[in-house]
Amino acid sequence: MTAPRKIIHIDMDAFYASVELREQPHLRGLPVVVAWDAPRSVICAASYEARRFGLHSAMAVTTAKRKCPQAVFLPPRFPLYREISRHIHTIFRQHTDLIEPLSLDEAYLDVTHNKQHIPYASDIAARIRADILAQTGLTASAGIAPNKFLAKIASDWRKPDGQFVLPPHKTEAFLKDLPLNKIPGIGRKTLAKMHASGWHTAGDLRTLQRGELINLFGRWGFRLYDLVRGIDNRPVEPQRERVQISTEITLAQDLPLTQTLQHIPALSADLARQAEQRRTQARTLTLKLKTASFRIISRSQTYSSPLKTTQDFIQAALALARKMPPQYRYRLIGLGLGHLLPEGLQTELWQPENPSTQEDPPCRTPF
């Protein structure tokens, strides 16, 4: 038998809002919301004081104002958040190079064989959280478990500013009473369907065979069968840190294509800043548009040599824009970079390779 892996999931506490409170301490204790104060905007992050009023990420700003008129709205500062996130990753790398970022504020770490030879993953998590607090003034929560699925659930168990250990020998008992809404991937419609059938916990679903779950939930039934048993063999994938750079704008009102495309220079400049900060170049650029009816349409182009400058991104984006349907009005525009390469490679005049089109449908143990 192989020894279980030691996986830590680090999740910063209300990251964007906590950064803003660090920068503006006079706002502490107030319901602070990070969002553009515009009718079409949604919340990027809400402080814990704001969450007491029912405010949360992805909630429409208009709804948030009705629920909490006294909320303080602050525009997001993503360059600052990215800078702090990079600092936090330097703390991670003191312990392991097996780091898989999920976003600016959360990541998986495989510390099975860690650089400082600390025997207990819970001690590593505690040290990381202490270093983050000392160096950034921000708090983080951690989940420690033998796989990514369980670690992510565990990190939410003692929030904020806490950690929870789920060793292998306690997994079965833990999952028996785990509410189904705690399992990533179970949305409201699926949850309602499960509740209607009398299933409320992972333990309830364990009474079903794999074939029954597949009949009920399609291909996802394969994975669901494993998850309710605590099985997740996915490795921590460090290359995800450099998979893509992206930026987008939600428009104040629905616009025709020609007016929507006027945001390409500003988006391209933001991409160039991000690429420079990460010392990387890209061979693929993606243009994403969302119609007024929330249909997402994207176009991508990969080039033989890297794109590096704002002007490169503008030219590539405008070339993709010619392939976009002109008959719609749009509510969002975004650009993304892929096939990232280290900065400094010799480049030639870039030429397109293969274009692509996509439309999306409307504990003291070894731990």
Image (cartoon, rainbow, N blue to C red):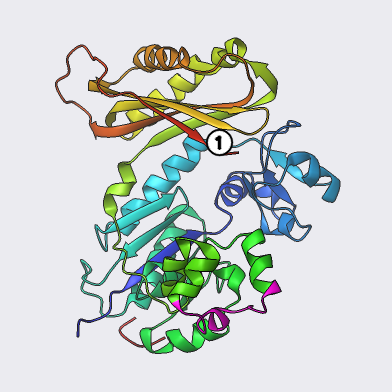
Instruction: Report the span colored magenta.
Output: 196-209
Left or right, 13 with reference to 146: right
**Residue in the image at 32% along x and 35% along y:** 278
Per the image, the residue denoted by label 1 is: 77
- Percent from the top left, x then y, of residue 7? 34, 70
Where, by quadrant of the figure, is residue 329 drawn? top right
- Percent from the top left, x then y, of residue 143? 45, 71
Q: Nearer the viewer, residue 193 or 366?
A: 193
Could you tell me if residue 69 is visible in this image?
no
Where, by quadrant of the figure, is residue 50 drawn? bottom right
Q: Nearer the viewer, residue 57 or 133?
A: 57
Could you tell me if residue 198 is visible in this image?
yes
**Residue in the image at 69% along x and 66% along y:** 192
Q: Nearer the viewer, residue 105 or 322?
A: 322
The kind of residue on which mark 1 rests is Arg
Q: Looking at the magenta stretch, what is its main secondary structure?
A: loop
Residue 206 counted in the magenta span: yes
Q: Residues within 10 Å of mark 1 (few under 14, many from 20)?
A: few
Q: What is the quadrant of the C terminus in the image?
A: bottom left
Q: What is the quadrant of the N terminus in the image?
A: bottom left
